[in-house]
Amino acid sequence: MGEFALIDEIRRRCALARPDVVLGIGDDAALLRVAADQELAVSMDTLVAGVHFPLQTEPFDIGWKALAVNLSDLAAMGAAPAWATLALTLPQADRDWVAAFCDGFAALARPHALALVGGDTTQGPLSITVTVHGFVPAGRALRRDGAQPGDAVLVSGFPGDAAAGLTCVLASALLRATAEAERAELLQRVNRPTPRVDLGLALRGLATAAIDVSDGLVQDLGHIAARSGVAARVEAEQLPCSPALAAVGDAAQRRQWQLFGGDDYELCFTAPPAALPAVHAAAAAAGVPVRVIGRIEAGSGVRVCDADGAEVSLQRGGWEHFA
């Protein structure tokens, strides 16, 4: 499969028309139209084989996840997805692999009306770079720098599931010891995370700060605290735990996954107490569970406390390249 046949295959399987795409795949650059009252949110992530996904991961799941991690960034900004570009580096252009990858990518792109408008293909070690573009009304983007003392800290979904699922993949004994239904649920959270786009849109005007949980809940909440010039307190007993996670490991291991595991692509955000009824209503309308797990205080850093208010001694973690 040559380079131009590869491009044609990607275009055929990922094509989606939008009225704001003046010119898409096939020229030297895409031509795109941005409405005057909108700001353009742009984010880019790279996935590298053996770093961001196990080498045995199915190509459909790689295609899905390559887009999901980027859509999660738009969700954290309260931006509606619009366009994407794809840079795909492959050891060889295997037609079946490319077809399955594109089908995974497209399966997530279409529900969000996201158009693939360009990119690049090269030969080399397997890696995927996606750049996404989304719209947010001027001045209404969710950011990391708006948290205030007294705000509640909330998280969507069930942080820790993806880390537990990845551990199941890498530690065969744990994989064998986990019941089939729970194992399938945790592996789904690793391979096909659900970007919380609808929740992010619903939180405009309600959340004071937001971030997606990609590198670990404590580490990512720490970015909000640092950018906002505040401290965050997490109540360990309030962390949500899915039935699948509850069936794996012991309590200490589960807490480690919940706080530091990462790769969940949930939203962690802050909101004033008066806004919480509206936040819960918005989350219910978006079909996403959210839970208050702590509060914002004066100071700096992130503390994790037990039910009595004492700080919990933990083995800190979180993903960081080059560390």
Image (cartoon, rainbow, N blue to C red):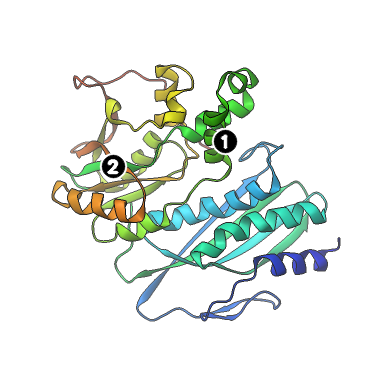
Question: Real-space Cα distance between discs 1 and 2?
Answer: 24 Å
At x 33%, y 42%, the residue is 155
Residue 317 in view of the camera: no
1 and 2 marks in contact (CB < 8 Å) = no
Q: Nearer the viewer, residue 192 or 220?
A: 192
The label number, if any, that marks residue 121 in the structure image: none
Q: Position of residue 103 (x, y in %)?
A: 67, 57
Residue at the disc numbered 2 = 154
Q: Residues within 10 Å of mark 2 (few under 14, many from 20)?
A: many
From the viewer's perspective, is residue 70 above or below residue 154? below
Q: Residues within 10 Å of mark 1 (few under 14, many from 20)?
A: many
Tell me the amino acid under the disc marked 1: Leu
Q: Position of residue 185 (x, y in %)?
A: 52, 35
* Direction left: furthest residue: 274
Eye-nearest disc, 1 or 2: 1
At x 57%, y 55%, the residue is 67
Q: Secondary structure at mark 2?
A: strand
* Direction right: furthest residue: 1
Q: Position of residue 22 (x, y in %)?
A: 57, 83
The label number, if any, that marks residue 187 in the structure image: 1
Where's the N terminus, which quadrant? bottom right
Where's the C terminus, which quadrant? top right
At x 58%, y 28%, the residue is 180
Tell me the amino acid under the disc marked 2: Leu
Q: Position of residue 41 (x, y in %)?
A: 44, 65
Which mark sits nearer the N-terminus, 1 or 2?
2
At x 60%, y 23%, the residue is 175
